[in-house]
Image (cartoon, rainbow, N blue to C red):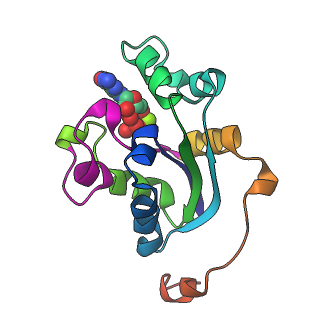
Amino acid sequence: MERTLIIIKPEGVQRGLIGQILARFEQRGLKLVGLKMLQMSPALAEEHYAVHKGKPFYTGLVKHITSGPVVVGVVEGRGAIKMVRTMMGATNAAEAAPGTIRGDFALEIGYNIIHGSDGPETAAREISLFFKPEELLDYRLASESWLYEEQ
Ligand code: GDP
Ligand code: MG
C-alpha cells in the first residue's frame, strides 16, 4: 500500500468543492487515513514548496496557499501516488483533461484546486510535514475485499 498527501487549496475550499473532491477518491476505492483543515503558515508553505524556491511563481504560490483554509489529507491504496496524480489532471488546469479534478473544476494553473505528491520520496516528506505518525490511522475498509483481487 502507498500513501500520498493531498491538499485541497484555498480556492477549492472557497468554491465549496471539499466534498466533491474527497468523494472522487472514496468512489475510486482509495482510503483516507488522515484528514484535517488548517491555514498554512508562511514557514510551512515555504517548506512544502521548497523545490520551487527561486522560480518566478514561488512568491505568489506561497502567498496564495497561505491565504485561507485548506484541507489536507493522506490517501492510501495500491499505486495511490500515481493514481491521485492521474485523477488530479495536468498542472495547468487550462490543459487538464475533462474527467480530472482540475479539468472539471479549474481554469488556470495558479488556481488549480488540488495538490498531490509527485513520487514516493516526496509523499513521505510531505506527509511528515503535515501529520504526526499517530494522526494517521491503520484500518481496513470492508470494501477492500471487493476492490483488490489479491488481499
Ligand atoms: P503540481 O505538482 O501539478 O501541483 O505542479 P508543480 O509542483 O509544478 O507546481 C506547484 C504549483 O505551483 C502548481 O500546482 C501551481 O499551482 C503552481 N504553479 C506551477 N507552475 C506555475 C506557473 O508557471 N505559474 C503559476 N502562476 N503557478 C504555477
Ligand atoms: Mg508538484
The residue at 45%/26% (across/down) is 64
Report the span colored magenta: 96-119
Q: Residue 110: where, in percent of width, then height?
A: 33, 30
Residue 116 inside the magenta-drawn segment: yes
Foreground of the two, 150 or 94: 94
- Side (left or right) of 96 relative to 123: left
* Lateral position of residue 99 relative to residue 138, left or right: left
Towards the viewer: 55 or 73:
73
Measuring 64% from the left and 38% from the top, which residue is drawn there? 125
Compared to residue 1, the image places residue 48 above or below, namely: above
Residue 119 versus residue 34 in the image, above or below: above
- The quadrant in which the N terminus is found is bottom right
State yes or no: residue 78 in magenta: no
Q: Which residue is depicted at the point 73% across and 65% down?
A: 137
Query: How many numbered discs, if any?
Result: 0
Q: Work out which residue is located at the far right of the displayed protein and give it.
A: 134
Compared to residue 78, the image places residue 119 above or below, namely above
Residue nearer the viewer, 122 or 137: 137
| Residue 90 screen position, x and y as percent | 28, 43
Which residue: 60% across, 21% down?
42
Task: Note whether residue 114 is visible.
Answer: no
In which quadrant is the C terminus drawn?
bottom right
Looking at the image, is 105 positioned above or below residue 64? below
Give residue 114's position: percent from left, percent from top.
41, 45
Q: Quadrant of ligand 2?
A: top left
- Residue 41 visible in rendering: yes
Instruction: Estimate the x, y position of residue 19 in percent, counting from the top left.
Output: 45, 62
